[in-house]
Amino acid sequence: MKPNIIFLVIDGARAGHIFSSQNTAKTPNIDLLVKKGISFTNCFSSVDGTTMSFNCIFNSLYPTKTGLRAKKVILTENNFLEKLKTNGYHIFGYIPKVSSFDSMVELFENSKNSYYAGPPVKHISETKEEILKNLDSIKLKKPWFYFIHILDINALRQEPSPFGIPEFLDEKFGETPYDKIMSSIDYGIGKILEKIDPEQTIFVITADHGSLIPFENLGFTDFEPSFEKELKIGKKLMPKSTHKVGGKVFSTVRNLVRESRLKKAAKGLSWYEQRSRQPHFKVALYDENIRVPLIISGSKILPKQTSFLMSNMDIFPTIFDILGLETNKGKIDGRSLKPILDGKKLEEKPIFLHTMPHEKIEEDDAEGIRTTKYKFIRSAKNPKKNRQLYNLELDKFENTNIIEDGLDEEKKLEAILEDIKSSKEEVEDISEEERKKIEAELRKLGYM
């Protein structure tokens, strides 16, 4: 009998915190899954946004083939959710209710398959009840695949300190808001583990992308003046017809003051520490934005940890190989890392990177290539601009751009980038009305 599978995506989870001994969150259940399962400590999302990341995961294809500006999850003919169905799996899910994920919902057999995405974001302390009810209702439909996507960490986009989880605000659950939320998530994972049979279930934990953790817990909004009194006085003194213009003036002044304060506070800080205070929706391809955890634990899985470089496109091919299922190797860009687990050698494969663009292509939209040793980044809008090269063995936090000194390496990585980009890009089938609806939802969630 094939094992059941729980596939949990923790939106915005950082691998560095889950696999680090310096992590201050209380995560006994995640730690147990790590101890008993396979940990891939060097797994990277090809993109820094959810939708395109899911397209890489489910299709095992470069984002050039599913759309570099994709606004919704696109499931191609050879997607792995359909492959699971073909192999006898019942597909269930519990995901945020946003239009971008409609194609996934169509495959779920359970009717209660989504929840309000916010704001405010619902924490697993609320969503776990429906997650557990679904587990009770699907137990007889074996084998099952249960996809869960939680947004708890996204709450920090809307409020710097955690809300909705009062029982986890004590310092014993972590030194940072991020760690406190991870402690809450771990508690929810523990409740799920109580419901499943570990001998018949594989538990997968990963993320769609990483997230920023502000240095000294001070994000960009902490440097922002409120001007509350000034706004109240202004509204009283100025006629209503001028309120809109006045609001823009206040907004401009507030932004200038914030930037000035941030610049002053940045003195003596590294580039890694400085950029940690950028807005959460700032697109970027630094490791904190794209390095994700990957844990595969459970039925007949032997404990192992590997730091071999892998892409999120490799997740499902690896799972299928572990299960002994076919993957259509010639039609996907990802590959199985099971040979590494079996002690065999596998040639390293560079990882293609691309930011997830917002409404229009901006100067900070970027593309690049990551290997174990180097990362090359350039502007996606103008390849001659914003060119960066980092030696990751000497500079793991990407503080020093060595583009002027690494001409040979830059050429090699850029050639790989051009080769991958030459693969055909699919045109996303989306109407203008649907695009506007999705963008409005993403903006509401703090992605735009």
Image: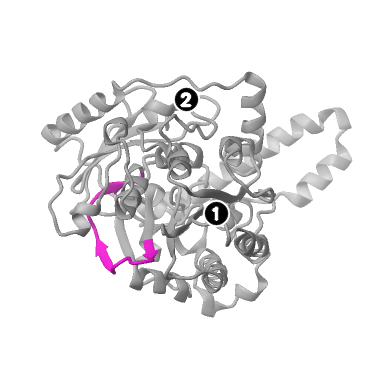
Residue 64 drawn above or below residue 325? above
Report the quarter where the N terminus lies. bottom left
Q: In the displayed orientation, state which residue is furthest to the bottom.
A: 172
Report the quarter where the C terminus lies. top right
The foreground one among 343 and 28 is: 343
- Let me know if residue 305 is in the magenta part: yes
Q: Residue at x 52, y 42 (%)?
A: 281
Indicate the amino acid at tag 2. Ile
Q: Is residue 395 visible?
A: no
Quadrant of the rendered image containing residue 434:
top right
- Numbered disc 1: secondary structure: strand
Neighbourhood count class around disc 2 (C-alpha, 10 Å): few under 14, some 14–19, many 20 upward: few
The foreground one among 13 and 99 is: 99
Residue 427 drawn above or below residue 274? above
The magenta segment: 296-312
Q: Is residue 371 visible?
A: yes
Question: Badge 2 is on which residue?
Answer: 361
Place of residue 277 in the rendered image (x, y in percent of width and height, measured from the top left) = 48, 52
Q: Residue at x 59, y 78 (%)?
A: 170
Total numbered labels:
2
Question: Badge 1 is on which residue?
Answer: 148
Indicate the amino acid at tag 1. Ile
